[in-house]
Image: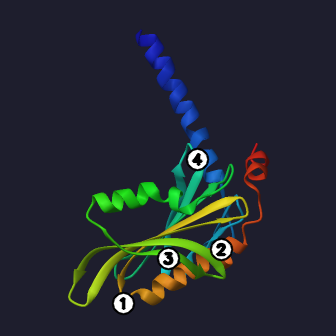
């Protein structure tokens, strides 16, 4: 039994770097410290006042990846890119996130389709708390682009960070989503 455990552990150690490599392979280094996702989406080092913190795997089962950003003052933005296997319902796709937000006390303050970067984007906004004249909010956004789901989350204080929030989402659904040119099956095949 001990020998089987040692062999299994050795095999696990040998395969771990290969699994990690597959995740990193979905992003390619580019000029100006940008990271290009398999979809073609570019995660630049900076989006306005936001600076990229990390890129990586969001969900192994759906092959979803993320780029996360932060700006001074506790403003955070995350982009999730997921290959689509069929029709995409943004409202249904965001259900797990909004249910979690509601379970932790967030109160829905807005929902609808908004124009960001020239694209129609489904959004849902929650208020988590307020302090003096600031209202702390989390905005969830989702739209399809070229065979991929592009989902974004922004945590910000309104009215102080409204311009930052708008600029981040305009980039994600404008210049960022416009770079998506690789179909999900082609992206997976190219990596094999």
Q: Is residue 30 left or right of 71 when viewed as pictured?
A: right
Which label was assigned to residue 176? 2
Task: Give the x, y percent position of residue 80.
Answer: 55, 61
Q: Which quadrant does the C terminus fall into?
A: top right
Residues 137 and 191: in front is: 137
Which label was assigned to residue 159? 1
Q: Which residue is mark 3?
A: 51
Residues 22 and 89: in front is: 89
Q: Which mark is first along the chain, 1 or 3?
A: 3
Q: CA distance from mark 4 to mark 3?
A: 26 Å
Cβ–Cβ below 8 Å for labels 4 and 3? Answer: no
Quick one: SS at disc 4?
A: loop
Cβ–Cβ below 8 Å for labels 2 and 3? Answer: no
Task: Give the x, y percent position of residue 26.
Answer: 65, 54
Circle 4 packing at 10 Å, graded few (<14), some (14-19), many (20+), is: few
Q: Which mark is first along the chain, 3 or 2?
A: 3
Which label was assigned to residue 62? 4
Q: Is residue 49 visible?
A: no
Cβ–Cβ below 8 Å for labels 1 and 2? Answer: no
Q: Is residue 110 left or right of 13 when viewed as pictured?
A: left
Q: Quadrant of residue 145?
A: bottom right
Which callout, 3 or 1, points to the residue nearer the camera? 1
Q: Which mark is first along the chain, 3 or 4?
A: 3
Which residue does the image show at 73% across and 63% down from the upper left? 146
Cβ–Cβ below 8 Å for labels 2 and 4? Answer: no
Identify the residue at the far front of this view: 112
Q: Please, which colouring scheme is shown?
A: rainbow
Q: CA distance from mark 2 to mark 4?
A: 21 Å
Which callout, 4 or 3, points to the residue nearer the camera? 4
Circle 1 packing at 10 Å, graded few (<14), some (14-19), many (20+), is: few
Q: CA distance from mark 1 to mark 2?
A: 25 Å
Q: Which mark is first along the chain, 4 or 2?
A: 4
């Amino acid at each position: 039994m001990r020998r089987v455990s040692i062999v299994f552990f050795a095999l696990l150690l040998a395969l771990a770097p290969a699994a990690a490599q597959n995740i990193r392979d979905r992003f390619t280094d580019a000029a100006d410290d940008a990271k290009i996702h398999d979809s073609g989406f570019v995660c630049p080092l900076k989006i306005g006042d936001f600076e990229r913190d990390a890129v990586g795997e969001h969900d192994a089962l759906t092959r979803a990846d993320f780029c996360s950003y932060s700006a001074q003052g506790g403003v955070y933005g995350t982009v999730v890119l997921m290959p689509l296997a069929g029709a995409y319902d943004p409202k249904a796709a965001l259900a797990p996130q909004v249910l979690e937000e509601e379970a932790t006390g967030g109160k829905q303050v807005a929902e609808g389709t908004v124009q960001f970067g020239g694209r129609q984007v489904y959004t849902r906004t929650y208020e988590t708390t307020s302090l003096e004249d600031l209202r702390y909010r989390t905005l969830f956004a989702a739209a399809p682009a070229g065979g991929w789901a592009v989902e974004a989350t922004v945590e910000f204080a309104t009215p102080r960070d409204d311009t930052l929030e708008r600029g981040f989402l305009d980039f994600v659904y404008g210049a960022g989503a416009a770079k998506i040119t690789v179909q999900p099956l082609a992206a997976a095949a190219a990596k094999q």
